[in-house]
Image (cartoon, grey):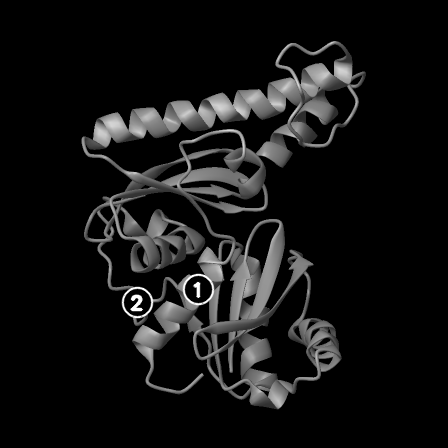
Amino acid sequence: MLLAIDAGNTNIVFALHDNDQIIHKWRISSADSRTADEYMVWLSQLVNFEKLDTAQITGAIIATVVPQTLFPLQLLCRRYFNCEALVVGDKNVKLDINIKLPNPEEVGADRLVNAVAAHKKYGGPMIIIDFGTATTFDVIDEHGDYYGGVIAPGVNLSVEALGRAAAKLPRVAVEKPNKVIGNSTITAIQSGIFYGYLSMLEGMVRRISEEFGKPMKVLATGGLAPLFNEATDIIEYVDQELTTYGLFEIYSANTKDNV
């Protein structure tokens, strides 16, 4: 089996793959101070709970946007799974896409993994919207090459920032209110967050498509993708397994081992 690790700013996702199937997926909050031993204690309990055996893990791949997590995750794979993890972003790990930017190393590993997966599954040209700590828009052309993108503050990050900066405003859940015009402080905030972001999404997709100059598919991933998909017709695909699928594809392209 392959262990695919996607380390983001908020959560780290551990996914087990058997051939091209995701067997199980777990997440833990990101923390710079966790050791390889702590990861193993947590992960082994979950694997055992599913009546699996960590000895079945024969390969690993890591994509991280938090540099401090890389060494303990590599050590986890080396010490407990007896394998050297592939790391997205290393020069010896091929992605089979071109990064058409002046400084390719600036692009987050998760965004490149999403680009590989999106082109493989859906083709292009495409806009990939990822609802994470940041809301990102990534553009791939018809060949799957990474063209560029947009980074905006994430939805939940904006809610937290509003709560910290305005002491009298309550914290609210991100959900779709019945009306745009709120009739209370809570519904007014919910409207600002939901419909404000929805307008941003629709506006950015339109502007990106116009600038790119060709019709583009639109795919959404991340926790809030289904919520916003229900409220707009600009999103053609929702794929919550995009990153883990991309990690499997990259691993398969870089090794002939059975996973």
From the viewer's perspective, tell me whether residue 232 is left or right of residue 29: left
Residue at (37%, 58%) from the top-left corner?
Answer: 117
| Rendered view: 254 above or below 135 | below
Amino acid carrying label 1: it is: Tyr
Query: Do labels 1 and 2 touch, CB within 8 Å?
Result: no
Q: Is residue 166 visible?
A: no
For badge 2, the amino acid type reads Lys
Reading the image, the residue beneath label 1 is 245
Residue 111, percent from left and from top:
40, 50
Which of discs 1 and 2 lies nearer the camera? The answer is 1
Q: Earlier in the sequence, mark 1 or mark 2?
A: 2
Residue assigned mark 2: 91
Q: Quadrant of the C terminus?
A: bottom left
Please indicate whether residue 219 sits to the left or right of residue 44 in the image. Answer: left
Question: Toward which corner of the image does residue 119 lie, by quadrant?
Answer: bottom left
Instruction: Label 2, secondary structure: give it.
Output: loop
Quick one: SS at disc 1? helix
The x, y position of residue 202, in whole percent, is 42, 25
| Residue drawn at the location 44% of the way across and 64% of the way down | 245
